[in-house]
């Protein structure tokens, strides 16, 4: 067993040095940004082709193979068939590929020095393309951000870059993913700076912009330079109409909050269902199929699966943006159906983004208000479709709390500047109201529920002031070396843990077994063999008198999620277990306590 961490890890000062001085020459950073941009540009093209391929496979090949007597009920089976593949792929190979992906990237940047497992690139691309292609009501931006970020992180890890440069490479990959997928180089760069890196410094700005530029060049070379939406020539007819767009911003803020709350409500409900996690996307797919059929009936679209609430929904949004065949009843119904379908897809374990659903909800909300305004004030003259365009940006801005990205992405996806003023106004109002009523965005709420507070300043010195013994879990579930692999797998499923220490009847530590070790043994047919044969015996351990900073370094070096805590004098004596969650919880408690104490020191009389 390995103890101590001084020989294995670099110092904190080395990890946090400015990247301009790394590797001797600043142009190395630019060169790597170009590599990441080009690489992710090609990956984004491949990802879009994969979505198209799976869509053809499910909605044309599979739908044609199913009995014609089923009629439209065939479309209940298609999303379920997709879920039958997505669930096991995510569960077995990379659980972080579940959901919309961006919070996982934000957490990696904030807490793990930008380190993301390389396998996430492949698993996220496969799972999300199947989910979207089979009708999952999600977008492709979350997956491509996670895919691009994983690619950037992988390049940095191969070249053994320090933490700060690795984080920049992650941001480069995220920017390139958005830029290459949406033909939006400016929005891609600002998305990475505003949401992923949360750093507007000049040092990070240049490589992120260069990476976004390179991905866009690659995408345009093979896919052409076309806007995502073709919109007619409309603009605000009178300046007196601008307050109505401010009112639209208020409405969009409420829709965004409803989206955030309902998404995590549905995740909690699905988590409590007593069925295997890998199987949950199947019944979820059946429900999404039913909601999709309702949306087709509402639109009168027959069996045109490109319309309704399945997939990214751009074709349906195009109808609202051109005011073709949509009525207040239709767009209002689509808001409710899309909200239910997206939260069901992600809550049941599907893989995809929330960016496109945010645009969809905003588009339909704006179209609804546009029709109401046009009915009440026909003399104003502005098309209801103009409100749909502005609503797209406002709901996304309120949900993500990224107003700059929202304005830019809508502009670049339409390549139309005429509605920029009402768009800016609606986004600003939406973010203001959403922030006032609900603290968390759709991205950082997921991290808050894990104990990660991104809205608080990062103070790494705190980790050096807390000892492992203060943060560790003392009530540890252990397994005996002679227990079978099958028994331990059942224990993993019932407790939802990801690993256990191997301890004998005296409580002595013999190793550690993870869910990955057990699955590997099961694939090799060793389900009835002692679990000690599958366990890791050369274990990195922590000591109770070590700081959490030392423990976190050990976790990062071995890319593990837990460390057994042992007595320094008797390294077989198990005292507890320290996990990333323990460290995050202890850090956040100390940080909140520090800031609370700081606020209490400022007495009212001192402010007079």
Image (tube, rainbow, N blue to C red):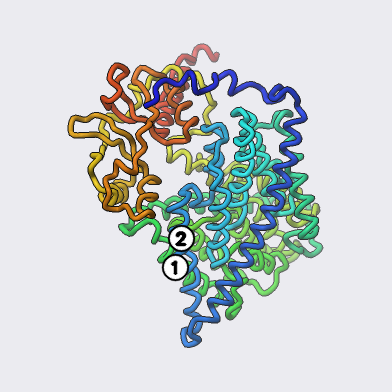
Point 51% across, 32% down: residue: 111
Q: Is residue 198 visible?
A: no
Q: Quadrant of the C terminus?
A: top right
Question: Which type of secondary structure does the marked residue at label 1 adopt?
Answer: helix
Q: Are marks 2 and 1 in contact (CB under 8 Å)?
A: yes
Point 52% across, 33% down: residue: 112
| Residue 69 placement (x, y as % from top left) | 47, 87
Point 65% across, 55% down: residue: 391
Q: In which image quadrant can residue 238 be found?
A: bottom right
Q: Quadrant of the N terminus?
A: top left
Point 38% across, 50% down: residue: 519
Q: CA distance from mark 2 to mark 1?
A: 8 Å
| Residue 60 placement (x, y as % from top left) | 59, 77
State left or right for residue 387 relative to residue 309: right
Residue reaching furthest left?
A: 505
Q: Is residue 292 visible?
A: yes
- Mark 2: few/some/many CA within 10 Å (<14, 14-19, 20+): many
- Lower position in the chain sequence, tag 2 or tag 1: 1
The label shown at residue 344 is 2
Question: Which type of secondary structure does the marked residue at label 2 adopt?
Answer: helix
Residue 596 versus residue 121: which sits nearer the camera? 121
**Residue identified by numbered label 1:** 287
| Residue 568 placement (x, y as % from top left) | 32, 18
Residue reaching furthest bottom?
A: 69
Q: In which image quadrant can residue 405 be found?
A: top right
State left or right for residue 161 relative to residue 537: right
């Amino acid at each position: 067993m390995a103890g101590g961490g001084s020989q294995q890890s670099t110092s904190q000062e080395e990890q946090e040095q400015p990247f301009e001085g790394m590797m001797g020459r600043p142009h190395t950073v630019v060169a790597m940004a170009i590599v990441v941009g080009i690489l992710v540009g090609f990956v984004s093209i491949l990802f879009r082709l994969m979505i198209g391929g799976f869509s053809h496979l499910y909605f044309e090949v599979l739908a044609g193979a199913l009995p014609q007597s089923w009629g439209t009920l065939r479309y209940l089976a298609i999303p379920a068939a997709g879920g039958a593949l997505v669930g096991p792929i995510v569960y077995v190979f990379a659980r972080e590929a579940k959901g919309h992906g961006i919070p996982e990237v934000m957490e990696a940047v904030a807490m793990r020095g930008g380190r993301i497992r390389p396998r996430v690139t492949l698993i996220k691309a496969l799972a999300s393309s199947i989910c979207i292609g089979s009708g999952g009501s999600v977008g492709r931006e979350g997956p491509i951000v996670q895919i691009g970020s994983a690619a950037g992180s992988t390049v940095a890890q191969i070249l053994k870059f320090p933490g700060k440069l690795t984080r920049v490479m992650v941001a480069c990959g995220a920017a390139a993913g958005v830029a290459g997928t949406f033909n939006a180089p400016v929005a891609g760069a600002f998305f990475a700076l505003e949401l992923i890196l949360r750093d507007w410094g000049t040092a990070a700005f240049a490589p992120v912009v260069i990476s976004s530029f390179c991905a866009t060049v690659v995408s345009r070379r093979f896919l052409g330079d076309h806007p995502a939406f073709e919109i007619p020539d409309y603009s605000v007819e009178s300046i007196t109409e601008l307050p109505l767009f401010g009112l639209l911003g208020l409405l969009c803020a409420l829709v965004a909050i409803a989206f955030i709350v309902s998404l995590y409500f549905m995740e909690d409900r699905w988590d409590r269902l007593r069925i295997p996690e890998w199987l949950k996307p199947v019944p979820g797919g059946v429900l999404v199929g039913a909601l999709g059929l309702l949306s087709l009936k509402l639109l009168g679209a027959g069996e045109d699966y490109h319309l309704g609430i399945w997939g990214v929904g751009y074709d349906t949004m195009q109808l609202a943006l051109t005011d073709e065949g949509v009525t207040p009843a239709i767009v209002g119904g689509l808001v409710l159906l899309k909200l239910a379908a997206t939260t069901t897809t992600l809550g049941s374990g599907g893989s995809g983004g929330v960016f496109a659903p945010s645009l969809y909800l905003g588009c339909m909300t704006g179209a609804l208000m546009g029709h109401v305004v046009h009915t009440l004030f026909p003399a104003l003259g502005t098309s209801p479709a103009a409100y749909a365009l502005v609503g797209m940006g406002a709901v996304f801005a309120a949900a993500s709390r990224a107003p700059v990205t929202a304005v830019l992405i809508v502009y670049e996806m339409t390549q139309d500047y005429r509605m920029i003023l009402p768009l800016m106004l609606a986004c600003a109002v939406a973010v203001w109201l959403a922030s006032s009523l609900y603290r968390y965005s759709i991205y950082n709420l997921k991290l808050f529920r894990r104990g990660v507070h991104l809205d608080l300043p990062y103070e790494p010195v705190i980790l050096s002031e807390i000892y492992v013994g203060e943060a560790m879990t003392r009530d540890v579930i252990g397994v005996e070396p002679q227990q079978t692999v099958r028994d331990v797998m059942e224990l993993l499923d019932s407790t939802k843990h990801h690993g256990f220490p191997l301890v004998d009847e005296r409580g002595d530590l013999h190793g550690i077994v993870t869910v990955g070790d057990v699955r590997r043994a099961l694939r090799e047919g060793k389900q009835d063999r002692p679990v000690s044969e599958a366990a890791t015996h050369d274990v990195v351990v922590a000591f109770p008198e070590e700081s959490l900073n030392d423990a976190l370094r050990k976790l990062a070096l071995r890319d593990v999620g837990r460390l057994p805590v042992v007595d320094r004098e008797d390294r077989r004596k198990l005292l507890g277990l320290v996990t990333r969650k323990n460290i995050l919880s202890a850090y956040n408690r100390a940080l909140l306590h520090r800031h609370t104490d700081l606020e209490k020191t400022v007495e009212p009389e001192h402010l007079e």
